[in-house]
Image (cartoon, rainbow, N blue to C red):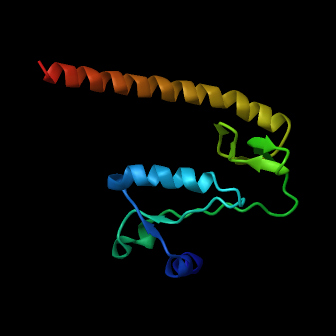
Amino acid sequence: MARIRDFIARTEFTQSGIARLGSLLSQVDEVTGDDDGSVRKDWRFCKPAQVNLAACVLEEKVVTPGTTVTAVGIWDASRGGLVPKHGGSSTIVTLAPGWGAAMVVSARKRPWGFLVFSILWAGFAHAFIYVVLKAGR
C-alpha cells in the first residue's frame, strides 16, 4: 500500500474520462506508436480526492529474471524486436507465462472467447438498432 501511495504522490496523471473518449483513443494510438520501446501513459479518471485505496483491489504482476515467457507481437528485423506497429499493421505486444505446449493450449481457447464476445456484441448492436427504429415510428 505504501508503494501505491508513493506512486500516486509522485506521478503526474493526465485527467481523462468518458467525455474525452476521442482524445483518449488518440493518446492510446500515440503511446503505442512510439518507437522508443516504452508503452506507458498514466491516466486519472476521477478527482484525486475521490481515490479510496482501501476500497480498491490492487494487483501487481512481476516477471522475475529466469522466468520462461512467450512474447507475441509483430517482429521488425530492422529494429531487432517486437513492435506495436509495422507498416500498416498494429497489435498489442503481449507477454504470457510458459512456452510451447502451454501457448498452444492458450491459443486454442482464445478464438472461442472472441466468438462468444462477438455474438453478444452483435446481439446488443442489433437490439439497440431495433429499439431506435421502433421509437422513431
Vertical order, 128 against 8 (above or below) = above
In the visual, does 88 lie left or right of 125? right
Q: Foreground: 13 or 120?
A: 13
Q: Position of residue 32 (x, y in %)?
A: 62, 52
The residue lying at 64 percent from left, 58 percent from top is: 39
In the visual, does 101 lie left or right of 14? right
In the visual, does 47 lie left or right of 106? left
Q: Position of residue 13 (x, y in %)?
A: 48, 71
Count how many numbered circles sit on residues in the image. Answer: 0
Q: Residue furthest right?
A: 66
Location of the C terminus by quadrant is top left
Residue 17: which quarter of the image? bottom left
Q: Foreground: 94 or 86?
A: 86
Q: Is residue 68 visible?
A: yes
Location of the N terminus by quadrant is bottom right
Residue 37: which quarter of the image? bottom right
Q: Position of residue 58 (x, y in %)?
A: 54, 64
Q: Position of residue 123 (x, y in %)?
A: 38, 22
The residue lying at 52 percent from left, 66 percent from top is: 42
Vertical order, 57 against 93 (above or below) = below
The residue lying at 32 percent from left, 54 percent from top is: 19
Q: Foreground: 61 or 27?
A: 27
Residue 104: which quarter of the image? top right
Q: Is residue 69 visible?
A: no
